[in-house]
Amino acid sequence: MRLVLRRSLWSEILQTISKFLAKSPLGFQVESSPGRVRAYAVLVSQTLVYENEAPENTDGEGILHIPNDALRSLAASRGNEGTISVTATDGVTAKAEWRNKSLRSNYQFAAETAIPAPEIPGDEAFTPLDLDRFQTHFTVCAEVVTTMRTRFDLDCICLDGDKSQMLASDGRQLYLGNGIPFPWKGKCLLPVTPTFPDKVLFGGTPLTVARNRGNLILRSGPWTYLISERTPNFPDVEGLIPHPGDTGLLAHLSEEDAAQIEELVPQMPGGETTNRLIRLQPEEDLILSAEANGAESRLVLDSSVWLGTMEVLFNRDFLLRAIKIRNRELRFPRGRGPILTEGHDSQYLFMPLTEPDVPEVEEEISPDEDSEQPEAQQETSEELQAEGSADDDEGLAEEEQTDETSAGPIWEDRIAWLEKELAWYAIDYAVDLGVMDPDQANPESDARWARLQRTQKALNQAYKESGRKPEKFPLQPPQSKPKWNELGQFSTADGQALELLCTKEGFFSLRTGDQTNLTREHIAMLLEPLLTNQWKPFTLALYYNDHTWWVDGEHTLERKGKTAKRHLHLTEYRPANTKHLHWEIEVLSHFPNQSKEDLPVPVREKAQARLNQLDRWAHSEPPQTLDLLNLCLKFAKTA
């Protein structure tokens, strides 16, 4: 057998496989055929495969085993030009030869075939995954899993095909990454090991996944990673998500406060103690505080909004992780339940602390103990594991029985909380609906509407459980249903086709594909050039977010030395549909009155300011608007 490969291809194979086999004596195997090469390495339950074209290998065909010592020598050869040829003569030994300028080198090694070839299904068995989202969730999950031996498989990431989730836990914290539609039913496990080839699987090429003959298989470009599956033994975490009605404190962190927490909380006293305790207190502002050995620090979160009056203590490391993964909603339940943080596509839970903080003492730790696990969290670590021993099951049963016997007060408390929370979300939704989204699909708008629907569903369930009739209230405004006239087509710099539309009443919008929606990006790209000569305040008649709006705008001029820069500001957004305007008035009047003083002050102020605007608009004539069609025609003639 003779195998000829360009040095750059050898380097690509050897660098990755040598890291994969760093602690294995097995080496790897190469299968060659004219014009192609296939290399694979096996580590217990893992296999890493490389398949690619090899035009230099014109006539070589066969199987070659390369042990680890030869692997290291070949990987250390310098230069990326030219080729390395390997010749197996007697089936037992092989000789590698390469040349670097005038320097000729060779290496002889034992080359007995030792590794069975992996079975990889065809391309049709693989399903594409969202690489960026999978990598983001994998990175967090890999930080959350534990290396300790437990009765559950907490050293693995659970890939749940039924719920499109990636889950990871160490018994004290739980991460749920949402939005990955895996092509299977039920759960399978992806172990987190130092040999996971993340650099090649997350290298930017499409990532695909398959399951075949007891293997979970990931593929990216020429690399394929197989891992033998084991029977999933991951805890059922469904019951760990706290009921929204059992909340004692709900906080939405602003980006400014999140940045402050990330920068300043590590500097607060108590960081050297076991529990790294921190306290969250709702006062006139939301306060984070920590104290140790007579030192105390207070961090005022003055731009965040919250609901509730409960104080809570927890490990600061968990808060910092929630901030790092961009979870900005923090839900603290009454009692000892886990704290829930939520982001756009993730949930992260961790246990509160109810024990006093303990100074860290240097002592010998037994191998079975987790030196980083705080005492209070050791006591509560099993609470993040929903299935367990018979004693655990009896404890859960007793808790459920207690809930059932006292259902009346519990559901009444839940109703009182959920009514306040629904009022908050309804006001935010009604006020922010008129703000033009920077993109056609705004994750924050989608998340806001999802929270509103989820809270209403929980409230209706609470009404049902308590025997009360659910209150019906229209949470969505009446939609505008315009008839469009097509005015012309445009093309963006990246080749996207845009169609300018106008209604009989003079409201303008853009259509891309089958979606009609105007965004800030479109304003800056297409409409702003039309408005360059509009120095006085003006009003535009626009259609976006499924509704017609009058939007007030103005230009300002910023001077820096001899240069001047114009800025377009879109200020007030008012509903053009009378039914929509009265719907918003009804929402902003109904919910603050219902919840009285329980709502966050900024939310009440936002609702009242918007009500004042709406009331003024309801008793005024429609505004004079700019004729964008006339401006378009002038612009076209000038161009």
Image: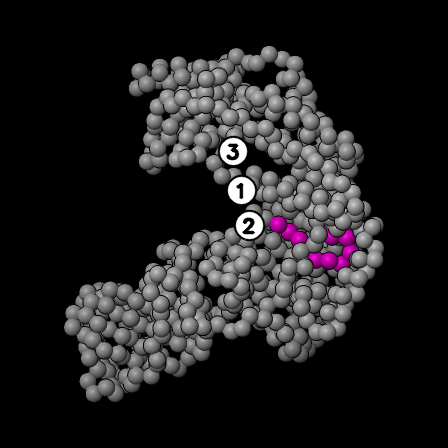
Spatial separation of the CA atoms under disc 1 and disc 3 = 10 Å
Q: Residue at x 48, y 58 (%)?
A: 182
Judge left or right: residue 6 versus residue 608. Answer: left
The residue at 46%/29% (across/down) is 518
How far apart are the two marked residues, 1 and 2, measured between alpha carbons? 9 Å
**Which label's residue is closer to the chain start, 1 or 2?**
2
Q: Is residue 332 left or right of residue 122?
A: right
Task: Give residue 287's mark.
Answer: none
Which residue is under mark 3?
A: 437
Judged from the image, the secondary structure of the residue bearing numbered disc 3 is: loop
Query: Circle 1 sits in a helix, a strand or a loop, which is it?
Result: helix
Name the residue at 61% across, 33% down: 476
Where is residue 488? Give x, y as percent: 35, 23
The amino acid marked with disc number 2 is Asp
Q: Are marks 1 and 2 in contact (CB under 8 Å)?
A: yes
Q: Which mark is residue 345?
A: 2
x, y percent for residue 545 = 52, 31
Residue type at numbered disc 1: Pro
In primary-sequence order, the first of circles 2 and 3 is 2
Q: Tell me which segment is drawn in magenta.
A: 332-342
Which residue does the numbered mark 1 point to in the structure image?
443
